[in-house]
Image (tube, grey):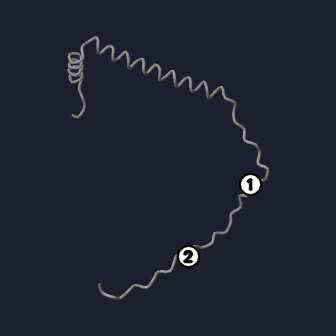
Amino acid sequence: MGGFSLIHWIILAVLLLLLFGGSRFSNMMGDVAKGLKSFKQGLSDEDEKTKSLPPQQTPPPSQPIDVTARPVEPVTPPPIPPADDKPL
């Protein structure tokens, strides 16, 4: 009920062709295609750059890392001041 049927898409396409004209519409679609092509090319260039880089190696630590659990000290909340019994 909320979607477009085939007739709606045809009417929309005809209105767009009348509004923009055939050549202008095809020029816009060509620009969109060029943009997508350059986007894909940019993605593949990034992949090639990351593949050509040598893997980074981290030096071994000079001392072993201590992973033993430490006891946690309890946290005491601050004292609550006494309430004033004076009426406002």
Q: Residue 72, how many percent across, how many down?
A: 63, 69
Q: How many marks?
A: 2
Between residue 71 and residue 87, name the one nearer to us: 87
Q: Amino acid at mark 1?
A: Ile
- The C terminus - image quarter: bottom left
The residue pinned by badge 1 equals: 65
- Quadrant of residue 2 in the image? top left
Single out the residue that lies furthest toward the top: 23
To which quarter of the image does residue 6 belong? top left
Identify residue type, mark 2: Thr
In-image side of 73 versus 88 (left or right) = right
Apparent side of residue 22 relative to residue 82 in the rendered image (left or right): left
11 and 54: which is toward the camera: 54
Q: Secondary structure at mark 1?
A: loop
- What residue appears at the point 79 percent right and 50 percent down from the top-left corner? 62
Q: At numbered mark 2, what does the secondary structure look like: helix, strand or loop?
A: loop
Residue 39 on image: x %, y % = 47, 23
The tag on residue 76 is 2
Q: Residues within 10 Å of mark 1 (few under 14, many from 20)?
A: few
Near mark 2 (Cα within 10 A), the count class, few <14, some 14-19 or many ≥20, is few
Position of 5 with respect to 68 (left or right) is left
